[in-house]
Amino acid sequence: MLYIRRVSKFRIITILFFCFSLVAAPSCKKKEETVDMYYDYFPQTGGQYVVYSVHEVIVDTQVNQKDTLDYFIKTVIGDTLIDNQGRVVHKFERYKSASASGPWSIQDVWTCVIDGPRGELVEENNRTIKLVFAPNEDDLWNMNAYNTLDPLECYYSGLHAPYSLNGMYFSSTVTVEQEDFSSYIDSRRKYEVYARGVGMIYKYYRDFVINNGIPDDVKKGQLLVMSAVAYGQQ
């Protein structure tokens, strides 16, 4: 009788262990499904906006041109639509003004979408890969993989780092390094900073043809700096 009782007790323990395994398995699976991909670095919520202070310089010495422009751009995540690939995408509306408070005039309507591991923006009819998810220091991607522009290899720096800008504090940002190249005739530096829950908060774009390796002796090109001054939901 003692032996039989021991066997029964063993069976009970086995059954309890098996039941616990069945309960625990879905819990483990659920945890795997909720891994943070950091998609909110590239928000897709309708009505979300960012206002930028923009400084732009355009130079072309062949036609004696040097224009310096200062203005404001407001970007707004708009309604959804179906793109030419059958995907549900958001309108990415761009407005321009001489003041941070408006009035605003529409300039462009681009589109944006998160497609699997990619955050894509179609700007000026060029489909670009702005971010890849989840951000990792080993990521390397061609921003122009889906358009006819020259390849532009990007990677992350300053991963999930705090960032202060124009009196605003962002607890988690990533910097997308796009280009850093200098030669006897070229000076190119391009990068963008993205904040969680906001999107792009800073853009630096410099593409100059220079004389004799002197960065300030510019023959032709463009400088564009976009710096967020406000953001929110409308």
Image (spheres, rainbow, N blue to C red):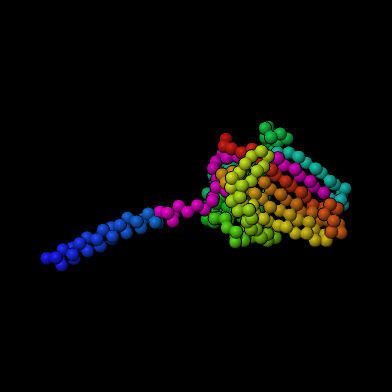
Residue 35 covered by magenta stretch: yes
Side of 6 relative to 69 (left or right): left
The structure residue drawn at horizontal position 24% and vertical position 61%, both measured from the top left corner, is: 13
The C terminus: image quadrant: top right
Q: Position of residue 117 (x, y in %)?
A: 54, 56
Identify whether 48 is placed above or below 15.
Answer: above
Is residue 101 located in the magenta-colored stretch of the structure?
no
Q: Which residues are magenta?
A: 30-59
- The one nearer the camera, 169 or 118, is 169
Task: Give x and y (percent) for residue 153.
Answer: 66, 60
Out of 180 and 110, give the one closest to the viewer: 180
Q: Residue at x 57, y 46 (%)?
A: 196
Residue 65 seen anywhere in this rendered image of the structure: yes
**Residue, far bottom:** 3
* Residue 81, x across and y down, in percent: 54, 46
Residue at the (28%, 60%) spot, across then down: 17
- What x and y, as percent, mark residue 230? 64, 37
Viewed as shown, does residue 77 lie left or right of 36? Answer: right
User: Looking at this view, is 155 or 111 the one in front?
Assistant: 155
Q: How many marks?
A: 0
Q: Quadrant of residue 152?
A: bottom right
Q: Is residue 29 or residue 207 the one in the foreground? A: 29
Q: Is 94 placed above or below 103 here? A: below
Picture quadrant where residue 155 is located: bottom right
- Whether residue 147 is visible, yes or no, is no
**Residue reaching furthest front?**
2
**Residue at image location 11% in from the left, 65% down from the top:** 1
